[in-house]
Image (cartoon, grey):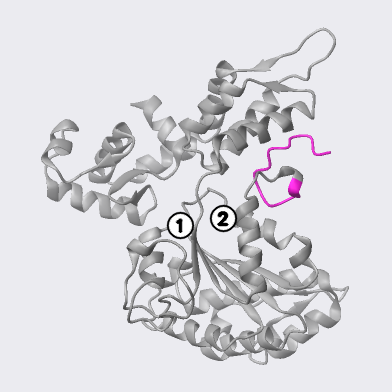
Amino acid sequence: MIENPFILRGYISDAYFCDREKETIDLIREIKNGNNITLIAPRRIGKTGLVQHVYAQEEIKDKYYTFLVDIYATKNLADFIQELGRSILQSLKPKGTKVVEHFLNCLHSLRSSISFDMNGVPSWGVDLGEITSPTTTLDEIFHYLESADKPCIVAIDEFQTISNYREANVEAILRTYIQHCHNASFIFAGSQRNMMSEMFLSHARPFYQSTSIKTLKAFLSHARPFYLSTSIKTLKAIDREVYADFATRLFEERQKFIKRETIYQIYDRFDGITWYLQRMLNKIFSLTEKADDKMMELADDKMMELALNSIIDESAFAYEALLFQLPAKQKELLIAICNAGKAQNIMSSAFIKKHNLPSASFVQGGIKGLLEKDFVTETDGTYELYDKFFSEWLKKEL
């Protein structure tokens, strides 16, 4: 049994995964029917965990080759191919030499760049400069996916990133390969709803009308390659009661106890976003003593504040450095948005006056930089700090 059951990284098993029963069944059904899926949700709400949970299910794990590719840090098509190839190789290693060899034999353009250790285990030693013809290597990777001896599932996290690549036609290139790859299903996961909606629901894009749309009908747009090419799903926060049951169980299984009201307070304070709930309860669990015949400590709201202060104190130096690096205009606007919590109509005279900002042009210039640097997120005209712990730290410092 794992000592602290509130897992912060990776996927362990069903026992440490909260709910998502309906979403899991739904995704598995789509995959088994050969459909591609678009999964849209804010960062840290659990998209990657859900994909890993689906991959671990009996209907999937032994019948498919499963790959998870994070392209958040990529800047161009060569970066994308680098991450795709690395992820496939890492996932195939536990499957045995024969399976790995088939993948490597497909990579004619990069075969000399794959290194092997003394035990014959391959590693992805490809430098970006060695991907001299990205479309050639991409063709080889898709040839592998099409020729693999099991169907494949490729989940691409932060898929909206490709919209910012310097190459103009990446979406069209990928769409062509995906359209002709019959041995793989794709999960396109993204956190920026407006960008994802534009990519997949635009009328003039190649994916138009290739599958049914289940949600987001209000966001139809017709001009992009992925239009109507996938089943589109949104991932919302886990139900508060369900998460409270989950957290209570994990405490009690290890002879520790927490007030249900405290779980509610944490859930509400962090909008039910899974990673923050897990981080808080991981810390509270570590601070709570086990019950015995003489004592039973009950984690409560005081323990919650103690845990929160501990977490933000651990990151205080990094937060100070981040704030110091911001230009004065962006820093002033960041503080205004932090004070507002969920800021709306930030160009309005009311918002500008309330937060003593110089002008609408000042706000317009500042928000662009804050969004680009991921200090702030925007959903339907509402702006808030991306890192909720950073927001808590900043409120303490003001």
Image point (48%, 67%), residue name: 159
Nearer the N terminus, badge 2 or badge 1? 2
Q: Could you say whether the residue bearing mark 1 is in a helix, strand or loop?
A: loop
Q: Could you say whether the residue bearing mark 2 is in a helix, strand or loop?
A: helix
Residue 387 on image: x %, y % = 45, 42
Give the amino acid type for the residue marked by disc 1 in the picture: Ser
68 sits left or right of 385 in the view: right
Residue lying at the far right of the rendered structure: 119
Residue 3 painted magenta = yes
Give the amino acid type for the residue marked by disc 2 in the picture: Lys
Image point (67%, 69%), residue name: 67
Image point (29%, 38%), residue name: 337
Quarter of the image holding residue 6?
Answer: top right
- Cβ–Cβ under 8 Å for marks 2 and 1: yes
Q: Is residue 274 visible?
A: yes
**Residues in magenta?**
1-14
Instruction: Give the numbered dot on residue 191.
Output: 1
Residue 288 on image: x %, y % = 70, 21
Nearer to us in this view, 73 or 304 = 304
**Mark 1 surroundings: few (<14), some (14-19) or many (≥20) residues within 10 A:** many
Residue 238 painted magenta = no
Q: Main secondary structure of the magenta part?
A: loop
Task: For the C terminus, give its image quadrant.
Answer: top left
75 sits left or right of 367 in the view: right
Quarter of the image holding residue 167?
Answer: bottom left
**Mark 2 surroundings: few (<14), some (14-19) or many (≥20) residues within 10 A:** many
Nearer to us in this view, 222 or 280 = 222
C-alpha separation, residue under disc 2 versus residue under disc 1:
9 Å
Q: Residue 152, relative to residue 20: is it above or below? A: below
**In this figure, which residue is indicated by the disc labeled 2?**
47
Image point (56%, 16%), residue name: 302
